[in-house]
Image (cartoon, grey):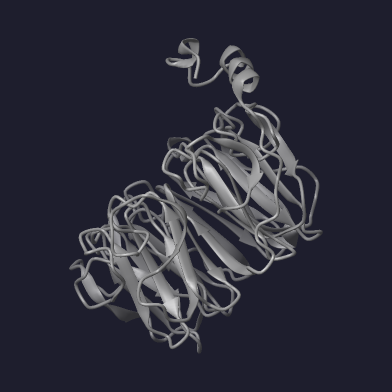
Amino acid sequence: MPATCDNVRRGSRCAVLLLAVLTLVAPARAEAAVSWSLVAAGPVSVCALRGDRTLWCWGGNEYGQVGDGTTVDRNEPVQVAGGGRWRAVTVGSRHTCGLRTDGSLWCWGDDTSGTPATVVPGDGHACGVRTDGTLWCRGENGAGHACGVRTGGTLWCRGENGAGQIGDGGTRDVTEPVRVHADLTWKAVATGSGFTCALTVAGALWCWGDDSSGQLGDGTRTTHLFSDVPLRVGIGTGWDRVVPAGDHTCAWRTDGSRRCWGGEPLRQPAGTCTVGPGRGLWCWGSNRQGQVGNGDTRNVPEPVRVGRAATWTSVSTGDEFACGRRTDASLWCWGDNFHGQLGDGSLIERHAPVRVAGSWLSVGTGTSHACGIRTDRSLWCWGDNEHMQLGVATVTRRPVPVPPA
């Protein structure tokens, strides 16, 4: 890279120089025999499921998060040790967790040997499985908590509990999932930083945990700083979606109206996005790189509609950029583009969504890279490649999608 770019992370002069020396690699189809079904991107590593249910990972491996029994970075997909058939995977900054088809949960990385091991109480992983079979983990080495709604509408939480975010009436950390408010039937749950909010099947909204910024939304901040049991937000029903982020919360009703409360969302550098009722895309928070997608770089304290399209199916946010998919299988990205993470062939930040070539089934974003599966089940990655998270032989950033080796 030219010396003039060493101390310039952003700016048109650096972008022009980079484009002048960067050879754009034209997309090339991944090997036809391989069919991919799911991809999950972490900050420096990526994992994906093949059509045969085998699990493959690559990229940064300092903590053994690739799962091949080593701590060597991998520039191409390697099968996770122990084989097996997998249903879901989630990738964190230092560890990875996967769900096998037999229902067993396995984690690797962090302070383990780097080889997958079944999760046992007290191992420091807070993981959960949603009713649709998807898997997520929050935190690492015991930091954070996770909650999940099981089939039948029961709500369970585990992990850190210093602010009562588990909702079990205490503040001791919980290593085994505990049931929350057994008298209610739940349909969805979401976790913030030290607090939790959940929706019942009747459309009521409840929150619990840290309330130091008023993020529980029940107006009790003046009487206590946290609640270790669920508190109802208002007396109405009709809530459809809740999005805790940092120390603030936004929620939507089925009629499309919304309400936000709590701390300052601008503290969240990555910004926040969600697909709201009616398939509209909403973003808010810090916007210095255009990651809100509303056409400028002014910070946005309240959710704003991104464009007029009402056809969004999903959205994934990285570090100051985001990518979203529409019902026509088109993929759009916006925000920071220093590493080519928008996949549009440039290194120019975009303040509104730009389309990534091709038709897509899904996308996952990392810190400054993204990977997606096209409708033909081929796998592609683009953006930063410092840790070989794109699955190609060199560490060169790629501003257009390329297939892992």
Q: Nearer the viewer, residue 357 or 231?
A: 357
Nearest the viewer among 251 and 132 is: 132
Q: How many marks?
A: 0
11 sits left or right of 388 in the view: right
Q: Is residue 110 above or below residue 339?
A: below
User: Where residue 219 sits in the image (x, y, percent)?
Assistant: 42, 55
Q: Quadrant of residue 268?
A: top left
Q: Position of residue 339 (x, y in %)?
A: 55, 33
Which residue lies at the image location 78% right of the left edge and 57% below the top edge?
311
> x%, y% of residue 91?
42, 59
Specify the quadrant of the image occupied by residue 284.
top right
Residue drawn at 60 percent across, 15 percent down? 17
| Up-down relation of residue 292 to residue 280 (above or below) | above
Q: Residue 130: horizontal and vertical position, in percent? A: 49, 76
Visible residue check, residue 42: no
User: Can residue 127 be seen in this snapshot?
Assistant: yes
In the rendered image, the vertical position of residue 276 relative to residue 383, given as above or below? below
Query: At 49% across and 10% down in the image, what residue appears?
Result: 4
